[in-house]
Amino acid sequence: MILKKKTFRFLALVLIATLLCIRISPVLAKVPNPNPSTSPTISSALQQGKTLYDSGQFAQAVQVLQQAAQNYRQQSDTKRLAVTLSNLSLAYQQLGAWNQAKQAITESLNLLKNIDDRKILAQTLDIQGRLQLAMGESENALQTWQRSADIYSKANDQNSVVRSQINQAQALISNGFYRRAEATLLQVNQTLGSQNDSLEKAVMLRSLGDVLQLVGKLQQSHIVLEESLAVAKRLQSPNYIAASLFSLGNNARDRQQTQQAINFYQQTVKEPSSPLLKVQAQLNLLSLLIEEQKPTAALNLVPQIQSQLDQLPPSRASVYAQINFAQSLLILYSVENQSKIQNPKSKIAKILAKAVQQARNLNDQRSLAYALGTLGSLYEYNKQWPEAQKLTEQALFLAQSSNAPDIAYKWQWQLGRLLKVQGDIPKAIAAYDLAIQTLESIRNDLVAVNREVQFSFRDSVEPVYRESVQLLLDTQQTQPEEKTLEKARQRIEALQIAELDNFFREACLQGQRILLDQVVDKENPTATILYPIILPDELQVIVKIPKQPLRHYSTQISQTEVEQIVSQLRQNLVNPAAIKATRTQSQQVYNWLIKPIASQLSASGVNTLVFVLDGALRNLPMSSLYDGQQYLVEKYATALSVGLQLLDPKPLQRHQLQALTAGLTYPPQAYSDFAPLPAIRTEIELISEAGISTTNLLDRQFTSKELKKKVNTTPFNVVHLATHGQFSSRADQTFILAADGPINVTQFDSILRNRDDIRPEALQLLVLSACQTAVGDKRAALGLAGAAVRAGARSTIASLWQIDDESTAQFVGAFYRELKEANITKAEALRRAQLQLLKHPNYNAPSFWSAYVLIGNWL
């Protein structure tokens, strides 16, 4: 049986996407011990409000807290009124009632100006910071939490200091200050390490682990979460043990350790803990089993989850859980020949109808927006277009009025699909435009979405861009408009940048950049830019020839077929004996990308082709394309660009070339599956013989510490690394090998970026001569693009797969000799070096010469 996971838009939705969700629960400010004159009724009302808040019944909590506040006003009890108002603000925040929340917290802080109670002030500031972050005022939130941390520090309340620091890290992440966030979290970790075991320490460690996971520090996150679990076990606290196990399950899932994740979720359920946590663990387990194509095990979970959901009291969390359950069921019940379930869509509709009713009863606009929109998704699946549109519009209105862009973009996207299928193309385009505008507004935040929401970039973000582009290009079949073509390629660039942001979990492309069109129209009018775009049923190509308007052409071919052919070609390219098959398949790709424009390219005097590649095409070296007589490298220099802009598009200053070179002949013992590279010394020597001034780190000298030292103290504008490395679709699995182990791509970025603050000369060229893309990873070239962008190099040359190191040495020597020539571009130097291998009797197969690609500035 095969689960049709991608058949339904319904399940592509993010479930509980609270932007910058801090899993350390917001803490209600504590009301001082009541005076003897305080009414017992008021005290019980406050306790009732807290109980309602803790159970997720926020609307009811608001009512109770409003009454308590009114009573304190009548009694002129300013301190308790201030605390009650801050708690009321927190409850309003949960409901998305931002104006009321702001009014309540402002009044609370005004009252506290006349009260000398620093602890209550700090607690109120914590709540204000949470409000500011939710409303997009991340810099204000950071300052507010810094202020509360200072108060807690003076009061020697270390646990509260730690909580404020974790909150500060979230604000820093929202601002894009990831290194500062990491430094803050490391400080938190040191503080927690010196504390004695306590329940507070277990909570803080778990919160720290969750935040580290958000910023992509998965292994560090795992270590910290294990510490949290150990503390909870020593304290013999079942609830805290279960919570740590749940977080460990989410972490293992993020690290793609599926069996570990399953085990952690199962252990969570076995521990005595809250019914809600058990349900959440089972729901995550259910979706994971579905992903892993284990329908029988998944079906066995369904009755247990249904029974436990029925017993949960109404709350936002229970509404989300029901939506989560419904989404998983739709995929599960779509198994081919599945006959065990009677009326599955009717069952799912009942679950969602219950979620809608509960959200209404709770007066929770945010969860109601989710529930209504998800019900609209089910109607969309059933092809009940008018009903689906009505529900979607209701959900979108609620999401927008609740200041919830993370929800709004999904319903804008859904509305676009519904309008398209009903034939209203102009309004569909407008809806897609709004969805992408919303996505762009929260681009930095997307990387920090809580992992519990099962955020999937490929399912929840990428399709919005691709479907929008297809809609735009479908309108261009008769009379192409350059304005629309420009919009389409800008949209694809935005997708590629978003992919990199998702890869690194932070915004990557920074700095002053020049439009590629300007480069080819003015600085380099012999280069043409090609933008292939893979769509579900066709392959579109937009082309920019110097001093000519944009044009486009298409091939009717499914995305699946494109990916199959590209995958087969990629496998054949690495096999020197598969030249015939390679030529056949590479000619197919040539026919898609180049043949329709070949005559215009010849007539325009172009000598360089710059590709902004999409999807699976990024795994191919364009130089290997074959026209039936020649490879593309025999006619054109080729280069790759990550987007439509180029950083510092200037030619290389040949007379000033200085290279920092590092090589590793034998990999560390733990990485013995990587073969020795005995020709590395020859490779380094050939760089010197080409006339390049070099500073060398070889074998034992090549450690991460020594590399950092040389980077900070040696003048260079070229970095050449002759060592094994791997590019992956995951940043934590993209690395280069040094003598002391792997240097992760983010660590490598940090080493090079620190240099920017010390030395004035820019890194013109980064060469990675023995790297390879991860086996079986269809999106591994994303790691190559990420490494190129984050290194800050103007240009990067890397190998897509590892080849014979003798031929590598020959290629490297030839490349640097050509690079010294004053009147050729880096792309042309690469081409000439590749042609030398192509003409060599031992290395003329594409597997030897085509592995190398140039990314970035080709000049």
Image (spheres, helix red, strand yellow):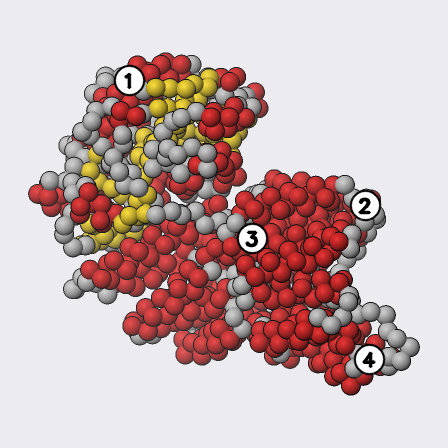
Disc 2 to disc 3, C-alpha distance: 28 Å
Nearer-N-terminus badge (2/1): 2
What crowding class fits label 3: few (fewer than 14 Cα within 10 Å), some (14-19), or many (20 or more)? many
What crowding class fits label 1: few (fewer than 14 Cα within 10 Å), some (14-19), or many (20 or more)? some
Location of the C terminus by quadrant is top left
Q: Where 360 falls versus 678 (above or below)?
A: below
Kind of residue at badge 1: Ala
| Residue beneath disc 1 | 690
Disc 2 to disc 1, C-alpha distance: 62 Å
Nearer-N-terminus badge (3/1): 3
Where in the figure is residue 175, as x and y percent of width and height? Answer: 51, 55
Using the image as rendered, state which of residue 7 and residue 693 is in the foreground.
Answer: 693
Disc 4 to disc 2, C-alpha distance: 36 Å
Q: Quadrant of residue 139?
A: bottom right
| Residue beneath disc 3 | 172
- For image coordinates 33% across by 54% down, the residue present is 492
| Residue beneath disc 2 | 197
- For image coordinates 8% across by 43% down, the residue present is 603
Nearer-N-terminus badge (4/1): 4
- For image coordinates 54% across by 52% down, the residue present is 173
What crowding class fits label 4: few (fewer than 14 Cα within 10 Å), some (14-19), or many (20 or more)? some
Kind of residue at badge 3: Leu
